Image (spheres, rainbow, N blue to C red):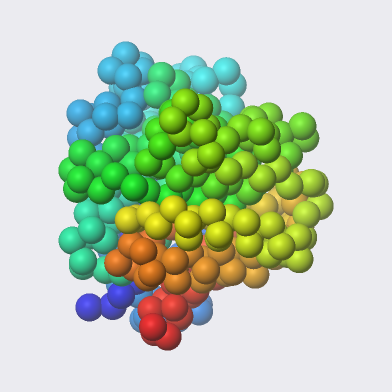
């Protein structure tokens, strides 16, 4: 069996908000096209998407909010938040498919079927327990964290986020959770949605010191990324997590239409490579990368494929 699985194809790309929206329908295929061009389909196991049951989604989200998504999914009208995340016919099923695909990847990694995994349409890190936010309906990251604990009894987890936007939906849901190691490099919230993730936000209560937020200046390049990454790597290494999640948003690559960062895909390659090595050291190799944001199609295709390539290269070199 090939050591790296990519969960894509089928109807995973149904999670989109139409051609006029930044999170449009072309993102999924742009990745798959580049994935095949690079021959990664011959090096990775291509796995189909899954589907999450409602009760699993409600391990993170409130019953009332999930019901609202179900209701608006039938009418296909209105917004699921204040105006960024429109409803569309079948939005509940499309969102549940994202969650279910991530959960299938979690199960396969924990059960030893694969060593690393990547899901392109996933990493919806803004959704809150009781609402959508920032193009994110259900927070698959949060549901995955709950599943790792409740289904697999894995408590000590690391969540690392290099999306240009702060992973606020994950951060605040687990702000007082000392067993979730959280490290997030994002464009400074003074310049970009959601405006959170200050350096001083390090967790609350017994979890103080288990969260690391690194606001990056607009125009931050690969050199600055690698310099700041050393702090992230040391932070995760010291925590010795049993499972690592990477939100690999490509909207931090230069030329994204809604952010102001200047990385290349080399930053994503570096992050995935270094986290793969940490996963081998502490987590039996278990690294799950999620696509996250990215609204320049070439950028997301290159960035996500760099993540997949790095995960495979580290397995081959181990």
Query: How far across and down, in percent of the image, does residue 39 sit?
Result: 45, 81
Tell me: 59 left or right of 263: left
* Outermost top residue: 64
Image quarter in which the N terminus is found: bottom left
Query: How far across and down, in percent of the image, does residue 177 sit?
Result: 40, 33
Label count reads 0
132 over 259 or under it: above or below: above
* Outermost bottom residue: 317
Q: Image point 40% across, 57% down: which residue?
A: 240
Tell me: 190 left or right of 296: right
Q: Image point 18% across, 61% down: which residue?
A: 111
Residue 192 visible in the snapshot: no
Image quarter in which the C terminus is found: bottom left
Tell me: 314 left or right of 226: left
Q: Quadrant of residue 241?
A: bottom left
Query: How far across and down, in percent of the image, does residue 104 sit?
Result: 25, 52
Tell me: 202 left or right of 28: right
Q: Quadrant of residue 229?
A: bottom right
Q: Image point 37% across, 70% down: which residue?
A: 280
Q: Nearest the camera: 20 or 254? A: 254
Q: Nearest the camera: 38 or 119? A: 119
Query: How far across and down, in percent of the image, does residue 282 sit?
Result: 36, 64
Q: In which quarter of the image is residue 23?
A: top right
Q: Nearest the camera: 124 or 74? A: 124
Q: Image point 67% across, 52% down: which residue?
A: 252
26 over 78 or under it: above or below: below
Q: Nearest the camera: 296 or 249? A: 249
51 over 84 or under it: above or below: below
Residue 235 visible in the snapshot: yes
């Amino acid at each position: 069996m090939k050591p790296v699985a990519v969960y894509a194809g089928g109807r995973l790309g149904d999670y989109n908000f139409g051609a006029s929206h930044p999170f449009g329908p072309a993102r999924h295929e742009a990745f798959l096209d580049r994935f095949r061009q690079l021959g990664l389909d011959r090096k990775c196991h291509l796995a189909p998407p899954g589907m999450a049951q409602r009760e699993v989604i409600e391990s993170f989200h409130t019953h009332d909010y999930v019901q609202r998504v179900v209701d608006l999914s039938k009418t296909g009208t209105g917004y699921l938040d204040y105006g960024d995340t429109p409803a569309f016919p079948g939005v509940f099923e499309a969102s549940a498919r994202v969650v279910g695909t991530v959960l299938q990847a979690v199960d396969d990694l924990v059960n030893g079927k694969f060593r690393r995994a990547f899901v392109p349409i996933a990493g919806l890190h803004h959704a809150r327990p009781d609402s959508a936010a920032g193009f994110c309906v259900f927070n698959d990251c949060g549901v995955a964290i709950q599943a790792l604990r409740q289904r697999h009894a894995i408590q000590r987890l690391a969540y690392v986020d290099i999306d240009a936007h702060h992973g606020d939906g994950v951060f605040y849901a687990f702000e007082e959770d000392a067993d979730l190691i959280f490290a997030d490099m994002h464009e400074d919230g003074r310049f970009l949605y959601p405006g959170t993730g200050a350096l001083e936000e390090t967790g609350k209560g017994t979890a103080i010191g288990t969260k690391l937020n690194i606001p990056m200046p607009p125009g931050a390049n690969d050199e600055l990324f690698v310099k700041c990454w050393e702090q992230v790597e040391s932070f995760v290494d010291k925590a010795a997590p049993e499972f690592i999640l990477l939100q690999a948003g490509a909207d931090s690559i230069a030329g994204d239409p809604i952010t102001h960062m200047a990385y290349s895909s080399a930053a994503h390659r570096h992050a995935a490579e270094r986290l793969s090595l940490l996963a081998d050291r502490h987590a039996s190799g278990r690294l799950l990368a999620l696509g996250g944001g990215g609204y320049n199609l070439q950028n997301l295709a290159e960035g996500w494929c760099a993540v997949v390539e790095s995960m495979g290269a580290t397995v081959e070199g181990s």
